[in-house]
Image (spheres, rainbow, N blue to C red):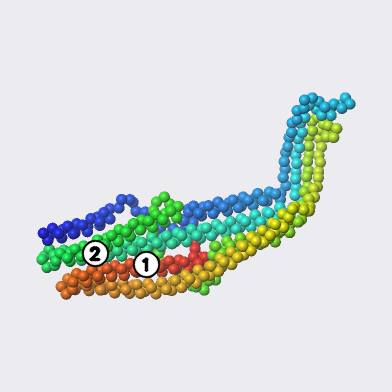
Amino acid sequence: MHGTLAALCVAASLAPAAALAQPSTAAPARLSLSAAVARAVARNPSAEVARAEVRRAEALVEAARAASLPTLTANAVYTRLDDDRVLSGRVIAGADQLAANVTLTVPIVAPQRWAQWSHARDNAASARASASESRWLVAAATARAWLTALAQRRSIESLARARDAARAHRDFAAARFEGGVGNRVDVVRAGQELAVTEAQLQSALAGVARAREALGVLLGADDAVDVDEAAAELTAPSEAAALASAGESRPDVLSARARSEAAGRVLRDSWVDYLPTLTGVAQPFYQNPPTLTQPLTGWQAQVVLSLPLYDGGLRYGARREREALAEESRLQLEAATRQARADVRAAAAAVRQADLALDAARDAARLADETLTLAQEAYRGGTSTNLEVIDAERRARDAATAVVVAEDAARQGRLELILASGRLP
């Protein structure tokens, strides 16, 4: 009976392991952190949309420039009257008329159009800065997802070691029970601890699957993507260096600065709304049949001067709107700069505390492993009970999990410091 019970316990513990050893799908591709960030920046839909916005802004520059350049238009008109128009026996308008002309319009002095052209270039520069910010955000999300997937993998490794230790303990308790030395309570307790550890391992495996899928989505891939642990360490700048570069190279600050500068130039250029425009128009024409006032062929030229005198207050309202937009963009730049510096200081403090916490967690894990080893030896020697071993297993498992959490916090802190300094991607 004792042998049957031990065999059933062993079979129950090996069943999940056998299922785990036979994955149903092929292993996902594994990428380093730098490779994952590079692929996400190139293929993530948000980054692609930002690049499309840049192309749109550049097209709007071309459209704004067109208003400052000459235009050439050809026109043709065919007219059918019910009959010839006759005056004093002379046809002054034929029943069939064909008129054609080519009109060349040249803006000679067009300050409003020139200002619009300049503002369109500023908007394109702002779009490029916004695209850089989008790439930065995509890179940040990808790096965080990569580190999360790495932490999940490390959690699996620690839980797998805990499961192996629990299985060895269960097997030893079952062997003692089979040999008539131990008791059934020890076997059940050891089996329960093994089942708990196995459940935690399976939950961690599900977390890894979710993390891999999330990483694949960020990379614009149709399949899950795994992490390559070969280059898992991050090198963060010092707090002083990060503070110095946060306001100069961080993409969100640069984007806010580009918008603020563009809004300021629009406001400063409000004076062009009060200037006149001077346009030249040249038009060769063809009229068949000719009329009393229109020969068969000819040409005409005009110089048109337009001076806005009264527009119902449109220009004054536009200026007040520009003042408000300029003030908003200035405040947004100040807020972005302030936030960047705060992020650097917070990340630097988090790195310092995370390193201390990691050292403490590793010491605790080392001591917990040593306690587990001593408890196992004492139990095998008959000088301690099964409860002491189970307690040591739980403490060792919790300590190993705490190390994984502390390592992830240290890596995440360094990543946040890198992001706060604007050095990624």
**Residue at the image position 55 percent from the left and 51 percent from the top:** 52
Give the residue type at disc 1.
Val
Left/right of residue 398 with respect to residue 332 in the rendered view: left
Across and down, in percent, residue 258 comes to 61, 61
Left/right of residue 414 with respect to residue 176 in the rendered view: right
**Residue at the image position 50 percent from the left and 70 percent from the top:** 344
Instruction: Name the foreground residue: 388 vs 409.
Output: 388
Q: Which mark is residue 62?
A: none
Q: Dot 2, crowdedness within 10 Å: few (<14), some or many (≥20)? A: many
Q: Secondary structure at mark 2?
A: helix
Across and down, in percent, residue 228 comes to 38, 60
Above or below, 386 against 62 in this view is below
- In 3D space, how far apart are the residues under numbered discs 2 and 1 (Cα atoms)? 22 Å
Q: Secondary structure at mark 1?
A: helix
Give the residue type at disc 2.
Glu
Considering every residue shown, the one lying at the far front of the view is 312
Residue 323 visible at all: yes
Q: Dot 1, crowdedness within 10 Å: few (<14), some or many (≥20)? A: many
Instruction: Name the foreground residue: 66 vs 4.
Output: 4
**Residue at the image position 46 percent from the left and 73 percent from the top:** 349
Across and down, in percent, residue 187 comes to 17, 64
Q: Quadrant of the N terminus?
A: bottom left
Quarter residue 120 falls in: bottom right
In front: label 2 or label 1? 2
Mark positioned earlier in the residue sequence (2 or 1): 2
Across and down, in percent, residue 399 comes to 31, 70
Instruction: Find disc 2 in the rendering and name its residue.
Output: 193
Quarter residue 382 falls in: bottom left
**Residue at the image position 72 percent from the left and 38 percent from the top:** 74
Instruction: Find disc 1 in the rendering and name its residue.
Output: 405
